[in-house]
Amino acid sequence: MRGYDCPNLVVWPETIEGACEFVNHMRQWGFVPTRVQLQDKGLNMDLPIEIFDGQSFLEPMHQLQNDWRKLIEGD
Protein backbone atom coordinates (compact mmCIF):
# COMPACT_ATOMS: atom_id res chain seq x y z
CA MET A 1 0.00 0.00 0.00
CA ARG A 2 3.00 2.31 0.13
CA GLY A 3 2.45 5.22 -2.22
CA TYR A 4 -1.04 4.06 -3.12
CA ASP A 5 -3.71 6.76 -3.36
CA CYS A 6 -6.84 5.49 -1.62
CA PRO A 7 -9.20 8.38 -0.85
CA ASN A 8 -11.97 6.20 0.62
CA LEU A 9 -11.33 3.04 2.56
CA VAL A 10 -14.34 1.43 4.18
CA VAL A 11 -14.19 -1.56 6.52
CA TRP A 12 -16.80 -3.25 8.70
CA PRO A 13 -15.07 -4.66 11.76
CA GLU A 14 -17.12 -6.25 14.51
CA THR A 15 -15.72 -4.00 17.27
CA ILE A 16 -14.41 -0.48 17.71
CA GLU A 17 -11.14 -2.01 18.89
CA GLY A 18 -10.95 -4.02 15.67
CA ALA A 19 -11.48 -0.88 13.61
CA CYS A 20 -8.70 0.97 15.43
CA GLU A 21 -6.36 -1.99 15.10
CA PHE A 22 -7.05 -2.17 11.37
CA VAL A 23 -6.23 1.50 10.85
CA ASN A 24 -3.04 1.15 12.92
CA HIS A 25 -1.99 -1.89 10.88
CA MET A 26 -2.55 0.14 7.73
CA ARG A 27 -0.31 2.88 9.20
CA GLN A 28 2.41 0.30 9.86
CA TRP A 29 2.23 -0.69 6.18
CA GLY A 30 2.74 2.93 5.09
CA PHE A 31 -0.88 3.98 4.47
CA VAL A 32 -1.50 7.58 5.60
CA PRO A 33 -5.19 8.31 6.12
CA THR A 34 -6.53 11.82 5.61
CA ARG A 35 -9.74 11.06 7.50
CA VAL A 36 -10.93 8.32 9.85
CA GLN A 37 -14.62 8.11 10.58
CA LEU A 38 -16.36 5.67 12.89
CA GLN A 39 -19.84 4.69 11.75
CA ASP A 40 -21.99 2.61 14.06
CA LYS A 41 -25.78 2.29 14.20
CA GLY A 42 -26.40 5.61 12.47
CA LEU A 43 -23.72 7.44 14.44
CA ASN A 44 -20.90 9.01 12.44
CA MET A 45 -17.92 10.28 14.38
CA ASP A 46 -14.64 11.60 12.97
CA LEU A 47 -11.62 10.37 14.88
CA PRO A 48 -8.43 12.45 15.04
CA ILE A 49 -5.94 10.91 12.64
CA GLU A 50 -3.10 11.84 15.01
CA ILE A 51 -4.07 8.99 17.34
CA PHE A 52 -3.28 6.43 14.64
CA ASP A 53 0.49 6.10 14.84
CA GLY A 54 0.81 2.40 14.06
CA GLN A 55 0.85 1.33 17.71
CA SER A 56 -1.75 -1.11 19.01
CA PHE A 57 -4.76 0.20 20.95
CA LEU A 58 -5.79 -3.19 22.34
CA GLU A 59 -3.85 -3.25 25.60
CA PRO A 60 -4.57 0.40 26.57
CA MET A 61 -8.27 0.00 25.68
CA HIS A 62 -8.58 -3.20 27.71
CA GLN A 63 -6.85 -1.54 30.65
CA LEU A 64 -9.32 1.37 30.51
CA GLN A 65 -12.23 -1.07 30.38
CA ASN A 66 -10.89 -2.87 33.44
CA ASP A 67 -10.35 0.41 35.30
CA TRP A 68 -13.92 1.55 34.56
CA ARG A 69 -15.32 -1.83 35.55
CA LYS A 70 -13.51 -1.62 38.91
CA LEU A 71 -14.86 1.88 39.51
CA ILE A 72 -18.42 0.89 38.67
CA GLU A 73 -18.32 -2.29 40.73
CA GLY A 74 -16.66 -0.47 43.63
CA ASP A 75 -13.57 -2.67 43.89
Image (cartoon, rainbow, N blue to C red):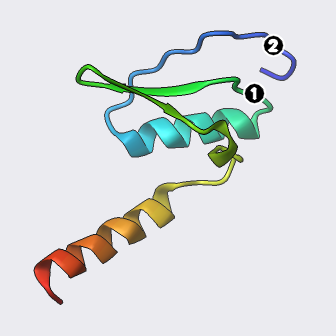
Instruction: Tell me which corner region of the image, top left, top right, bottom left or bottom right, holds residue 15.
Output: top left
Residue at the spot of label 2: 4
Q: Amino acid at mark 1?
A: Phe
The quadrant holding residue 45 is top left
At x 22% / y 73%, what residue is drawn?
69
What is the three-letter code of the residue carrying label 2?
Answer: Tyr
**Residue 5 image point, x, y percent:** 78, 10
Q: Along the line of sight, which residue is nearer the eye, 43 or 53?
A: 43
Spatial CA span between label 1 and label 2: 8 Å
Residue at left 46%, top 20%? 11
Q: Looking at the picture, does residue 38 appear above or below residue 66?
A: above
**Label 1's element?**
loop
Residue on which the image places disc 1: 31
Question: Does residue 39 sit above or below 70 in this rendering?
Answer: above
Q: Position of residue 6 (x, y in %)?
A: 70, 11
The local crowd at label 2, few if under 14, some if 14 to 19, many if 20 or more residues have their Cα within 10 Å, is few
